[in-house]
Amino acid sequence: NRQPYRHQWADDTMSESKFESLKEGNPSALSISVDEPTGGLTAGLDPVMRATGGTWIAWGDGNADRVVTDEDDCVAVPPDADDQYTLRRLWLSDEAVDGYYAGLSNRVLWPLCHDRPDLVSFRPTDLAWYRRVNRQFAAAIRTHATPNAGIWIQDYHLGLVPSYLVDELPPGTTLGVFWHIPWPTPDVYESCPFGRELLVGLLGADVLGFHLESYATRFLECVDRFVPSAQIDRSERAIRHDGTATKLVASPMGVDTANYERRARAGNRARWESLCERYGIDPTCHIGIGVDRLDYTKGIPERLEALEQFFENHPDWRGSFTFVQKATPSRTGIPAYDRLGDRVRRRVERLQARFGTDTWQPVVYTEDILPVEDLVALYRRADLAIVSSLCDGMNLVAQEFVASSVDDDGVLVLGTDVGAAEVLGPHALLVDPTDTPQFADRIHDALTMSTSEVRSRMRAMRQVVTAHRLEAWMGEQLEYLAQNPLQSGRRPKN
Ligand code: GDG
């Protein structure tokens, strides 16, 4: 779904004369900026693609589409390097994006998979767009797939693509899907408006990956209930249906640990001091952090409630502990997200009004997007990080915090229903984010933990995140694609 590089006209205008000079083969008349890949997955896949070559197919958001047609939109990136690969963008209309992305993906699949069927808002036209855009992706894959190619599809925006490719690909190709969010129980999944169609869609894949065993098990249970004609081999985690064979695999995604460590060690005091100045953080305070998209799954209001309880129970910490909450606005325009933003901002104001002084803020709240160096400076300096999503496929922030804690001196307070708890659980302080008194106690435990315990927990977590690093996860997934464990044959058309 996501593109690794976004090309933007610098001045956001496309004049007639610029357009004419481009058509005459004079691109220097244009000023196009290129963003670097951000986010765990795109940043992690980019070097792999540069090493292997191949084609990355993505929805092209940005504004450089005005001179690029659907036929000639293959550009090689980066422009000046030897290790290039092809980036093919699908230029979608605003209506298509509103339907398949904001609509079906984020108003139906996202709440459903995060155990919030009450927030599902289904419009039949969104499903029509989801099918249509998924068909467009499938058509692009068909065009680019060569015999024996490995095709790797990412995430819930593209769940029907595999079924559109059954019997449509060159011989020897293997098709894998990684589903980055949880999979719901059959009782929740029952309310999916295209439940059977999506399951059969995903069964077009040879390999279907989830972060956790429990998500794979729930997928299997859903197939068992809603696709009774499928044959399920539970011990093998294999599903055969209508000529397809799908192997389910569970493999928690990691982060680029070496990169976070390097950035953390390269960081300097000045960067932290300038952050303190910018956000009015008292640098002498103990620091807690939360780094999330402003999403109802991340449990931000519950966290603020626990902080309020903590400051109420422990007045001695007022003035000497500040919590920095970085919340990136996300999916704005969807009512559930807009309501959440209002609720969070009100809670922050309430905390400030109750406990804040002229010289100290209990919570420093920002919706700014920070450069990764600033984020790493926060991770390194923080005495504790709270990752307390109510439901979260994996959560990379928890692992980034650990990877950046090169001084072994931070405590991680982690929600029990965060995927990362499966990996880091024994060494983090686990919390039920809806149990406010317990949550407030955990914050106190984190702040008063002995230095030796902090160090031994952090060292153990650092070993775990290194073992599960992004490179290892990606290697494992690509190995599955190379092996095609069930040897499910793809028959070419005709
Ligand atoms: C989905 C699943 C799963 C955040 N603020 C800034 C910034 N970030 C970066 C973080 C991190 C990423 O955004 C957030 O990743 P998460 O994994 O925490 O959460 P989702 O976006 O919900 O991701 C999740 C993931 O997919 C991968 O499978 O783990 O469960 O929900 O990398 O660092 N980066 C920068 N500035 C910011 O202000 N540079």
Image (cartoon, helix red, strand yellow):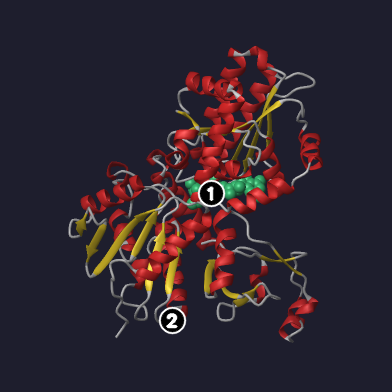
The total number of labels drawn is 2
Which residue lies at the image location 57% right of the left edge and 20% below the top edge? Answer: 444
Q: Residue 176 carries which label?
A: none
Q: Mark 2 points at which residue?
A: 146
- Compared across the picture, whether 240 is left or right of 171 comes to left
Q: Mark 1 points at which residue?
A: 466
Q: Is mark 2 on a helix, strand or loop?
A: loop
Residue 75 coordinates in the image, percent (x, y): 62, 76
Foreground tag (1 vs 2): 1
Q: Describe residue 234's horizontal placement relative to residue 375 as left or right.
A: left
Q: Position of residue 419 (x, y in %)?
A: 44, 42
How many other residues sit within 10 Å of disc 1, few (<14), some (14-19) or many (≥20)?
Answer: some
Do the residues bearing badges 1 and 2 touch, measured as CB atoms within 8 Å? no
* Kind of residue indicated by mark 2: Thr
Residue 145 located left or right of residue 488: right
Q: Quick check: 203 above or below 367?
A: below
Disc nearer the start of the sequence (1/2): 2
State whether residue 60 appears in this view: no
Does residue 143 appear anywhere in the picture? Answer: yes
Residue 149: which quarter of the image?
bottom left
**Res. 486 image quadrant:** bottom left
Tell me residue 283's x, y (percent). 77, 29
Residue under the image location 48 percent in, 60 percent down: 474
Question: Label 2 neighbourhood size at 10 Å, few (<14), some (14-19), many (20+)?
Answer: some
Give whichever of 490, 162 is nearer the camera. Answer: 490
Q: What residue type is labelled 1?
A: Thr
Find residue 169 and report its image quarter: bottom left
Q: Distance between the residues labelled 1 and 2?
A: 35 Å
Query: Residue 174, how many percent across, how many down?
Result: 37, 71
Q: Residue at x 52, y 60 (%)?
A: 97
- The secondary structure type at the circle numbered 1 is helix
Drawn side of residue 187 relative to residue 323, left or right: left
